[in-house]
Amino acid sequence: MMWRNQTFSSDFILLGIFNYSPTHIFLFSLVMGIFSVAFLGNTAMVLLIYLDTHLHISMYFLLSQLSLMDLMLICTTVPKMAFNYFSGSKSISLAGCGAQIFFCVSLLGAECFLLAVMAYDRYVAICHPLRYTILMNQKLCALMTVASWILGFLDGIIVLVAALSLSYCSSLEIHHFFCDVAALFPLSCTDTSAFERLLFICCVVMLILPVSVIIISYSYVLQAVICMSSTESRRKAFTTCSSHLSVVRLYYGAAMFMYMRPASNHTPDQDKIVSVFYTVLTPMLNPLIYSLRNKEVSRGLRKLLRKGKLV
């Protein structure tokens, strides 16, 4: 690999997103509050779905995997940012930077594929309810979930190897609060155009293909909902699907804005703000959206709280 000696002997410097002014101290405290809610919310969702036998169906198993991915994603970036902020240190080791790149890309990719699987699950449940247990059996659900994780990890390995193959001979200061792939481009003294094309192809696979599956699935779902004779059935189907679509809009919108634009259109401040949105804010909103808009999840949560299993 074409790494200069200074890369091996020196850590990267994460310039971060906050300073110690009163306004930034407030914003940092806000982010830490969001992190706490996201951490507790996603942990509660994973435990709730594991403990409540009434939620042991494909839909909620997929939801537990989404919460697990969100939990891992937010823990990949925020704790290091908080440690650097409190300690005054801005450094991150080569291994730490590589780990952040790998886990961020892997989890983002895995979540993209999982959201497509969740859309297919809703399509089967609404359009083929009598065949749901056959078309979306536990084995198939597990296989599609494992495939989502594997595809995400493969994407992470590809991006990590490509990032480490670049030569970094300029300043090692990263204008970000974590090691994001796009933030490493300005540090390279070699041509990054090939890597940018590779990253774009990975984004097409991770974003465009799952979005296509989601659009097709919900096109059929919309037709089925319109044709339902029961108002209560339409309301229940709309509530379930609108929760999933809310997550899809939040997640894919930010990811596409971040990774499907040319590198020349990126600015450090803009990238940091968008990154906060999909690595911190969205993981907090996901459990809130599903728990507040899903009666089964809310009922199960209240039941387990009464029994004292989640306190």
Image (cartoon, grey):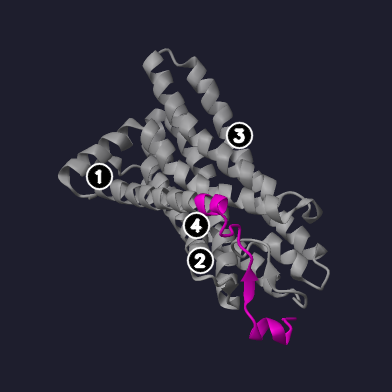
Image side of residue 305 versus residue 70, left or right? left
* Of marks 2 and 1, the one in the foreground: 2
The residue at which mark 3 appears reads as: 215
The magenta stretch is 1-26
How far from the left and from the top, in percent, is residue 281? Answer: 51, 46
What number of labels is visible?
4
Q: Residue at x 54, y 24 (%)?
A: 222
Residue at mark 4 to residue at mark 1: CA–CA distance: 25 Å
Helix, strand or loop at disc 4? Answer: helix
Q: Which circle's residue, 2 or 1, is located before the other in the chain?
A: 1
Report if residue 204 is visible in the image: no
The residue at which mark 4 appears reads as: 73
Helix, strand or loop at disc 1? Answer: loop
Q: Is residue 9 above or below residue 307?
A: below
Residue at mark 3 to residue at mark 1: CA–CA distance: 31 Å
Please name whichever residue, 101 or 204, is drawn nearer the observer in this view of the structure. 101
Residue at mark 4 to residue at mark 3: CA–CA distance: 25 Å
Helix, strand or loop at disc 2? Answer: helix
Residue lying farthest to the left in this orientation: 307
Q: Which circle's residue, 2 or 4, is located before the other in the chain?
A: 4
Mark 1, residues whose alpha carbon is within 10 Å: few (<14), some, or many (≥20)? Answer: some
Are the residues flagged by discs 3 and 1 in contact, CB closer than 8 Å? Answer: no
Query: Which labelled disc corresponds to residue 52?
Result: 1
Query: Which labelled disc corresponds to residue 80?
Result: 2
Mark 2, residues whose alpha carbon is within 10 Å: few (<14), some, or many (≥20)? Answer: some
* Of marks 3 and 2, the one in the foreground: 2
Residue at mark 2 to residue at mark 4: CA–CA distance: 12 Å
Residue at mark 2 to residue at mark 1: CA–CA distance: 33 Å
Are the residues flagged by discs 4 and 1 in contact, CB closer than 8 Å? Answer: no
